[in-house]
Amino acid sequence: NMYACAELGSMEFDGLVSGERNYKACFNYYLKAASKDHPKGCWMVANLMLSGRVKCKFDMAWEYLNKSIELGSISGYNTLGLCYLRGTNPENKVDLEKAKYYFEIASNLGYIYSFNNLGKMCEDEGNIEEAIKYYKISADMGESWALNKIGEYYRKNGDLSTAYIYYSKSIEAPISERVAYPYFNLAKY
């Protein structure tokens, strides 16, 4: 059952089966799900390979990533954007236009992390106000990293009370999404 395999893959990824993350078992479960055309299964197979958690040939990762998109994986679009942002693609070249294009597709479909990626691209270009717009969308969806980024923005602009609110919200995000930065920022500022 592709759904059961995907669920077991997710549990192995999070370390819920043995208490430790087991990427090999995770990969094997997701590969079984992918063989039955499960979109997340295809994406996770590619993701595990592209992130270096599982060794493979690049062509296989690229094939599963594109298959995930064909099957409707929004995460796949975001990962494809990351591949072009980092130069991890068949051309081995950074292509910021393609990266932004794929992040925008994912964001139009409501994928939370694509807003962070668009914001980071704007921030790297020096367009802080545009970056904050993207981060706020992600923060409004409850994403811990973006909540912390907004807190940093307010702190740097002298509004410590609003920064405190965003840092606190970042800490309150679900544990699987929580980042450590707001703890540091609350302690420091």
Image (cartoon, rainbow, N blue to C red):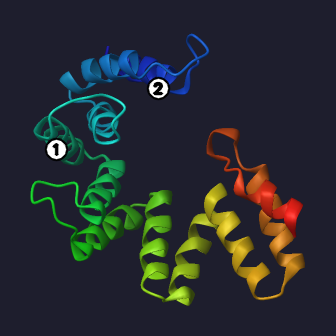
Q: Quadrant of the N terminus?
A: top left
Where residue 151 sits in the image (x, y, percent)? 74, 72
Residue at the spot 62% in from the left edge and 64% down from the top edge:
146
Which one is earlier in the sequence, the residue at label 2 or at label 1?
Answer: 2
Q: Position of residue 17 (x, y in %)?
A: 55, 12
Q: Nearer the viewer, residue 67 or 164?
A: 164
Q: Residue at x 24, y 77 (%)?
A: 97
Q: Locate residue 174, reporting x and y percent.
A: 70, 43
The secondary structure type at the circle numbered 1 is helix
The residue pinned by badge 1 equals 62
Cβ–Cβ under 8 Å for marks 2 and 1: no
Please state which amino acid type lies under the numbered disc 2.
Ser
Disc on res. 96: none
SS for tag 2? Answer: helix
Residue 157 or residue 166, whichever sits in front: 157
Residue on which disc 2 sits: 10
Q: Is residue 2 visible?
A: no
Q: CA distance from mark 2 to mark 1?
A: 21 Å
Q: Residue at x 70, y 40 (%)?
A: 175
| Residue 186 visible (yes or no) | yes
Q: Position of residue 99 (x, y in %)?
A: 28, 68
63 lies left or right of 182: left
Q: Is residue 78 above or below residue 99?
A: above
Whether 125 is drawn above or below 117: the answer is below
Task: Kindly report which numbered mark, 2 or 1, lies closer to the viewer in this rendering.
Answer: 1
Q: Is residue 69 left or right of residue 182?
A: left
